[in-house]
Amino acid sequence: MKKKPKNFMQEDPHQKVYDELFALMVKKSLELDPQMVASTFVALGLRQYRTLLPEHDFERLLETFMETAKQIRPFTEAPVDKGRLH
């Protein structure tokens, strides 16, 4: 098994952003209504995708979300390590 380098967080900007935003989400969810925090993150993400992607790709993204929605696990369940899916 390959070990992660000590400076893994510096080498993987995607993981760094994920971890930073996750920490912010937890902090805000403790301060505010967690559903309001979740809906805000979803709305911001969808607006960014809408801005960045051509219409066809945006529609395909939404279809993928709908097709894979049942695979989303709540935070209370143990994670399944299948590599990065986000």
Image (cartoon, rainbow, N blue to C red):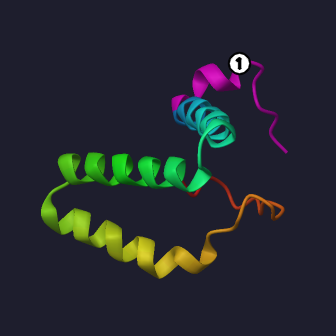
**Quadrant of the rendering where the C terminus is positioned:** bottom right
Is residue 6 placed above or below 20 in the rendered structure? above
Q: Residue furthest left?
A: 55
**In front of the other: 62 or 3:** 62
- Rate crowding at label 1 as few (under 14), some (14 to 19) or many (20 or more) other CA atoms within 10 Å: few
**In front of the other: 66 or 43:** 43
| Magenta segment | 1-13
Residue 5 lies, in percent from the top left, at 75, 24
**Quadrant of the rendering where the N terminus is positioned:** top right
In this picture, residue 53 sits left or right of residue 25: left
Principal secondary structure, stretch drawn in magenta: loop
Q: Give the residue at mark 1.
A: 7
User: Residue placed at 15% from the left, 57% from the top?
Assistant: 54
User: Residue placed at 56% from the left, 35% from the top?
Assistant: 21
Is residue 60 placed above or below 28 in the rendered structure? below
User: Residue placed at 36% from the left, 53% from the top?
Assistant: 43
Q: Is mark 1 on a helix, strand or loop?
A: loop
**In front of the other: 31 or 8:** 31
Is residue 83 placed above or below 19 in the rendered structure? below
In this picture, residue 8 sits left or right of residue 79: left
Q: Quadrant of residue 42?
A: bottom left
In this picture, residue 49 sits left or right of residue 16: left
Q: Does the magenta stretch include residue 9?
A: yes
Q: Is residue 8 magenta?
A: yes
Q: Which amino acid, by three-letter code, is at mark 1? A: Asn
Residue 84 lies, in percent from the top left, at 61, 52
User: Residue placed at 53% from the left, 32% from the top?
Assistant: 17
Q: Quadrant of residue 22?
A: top right
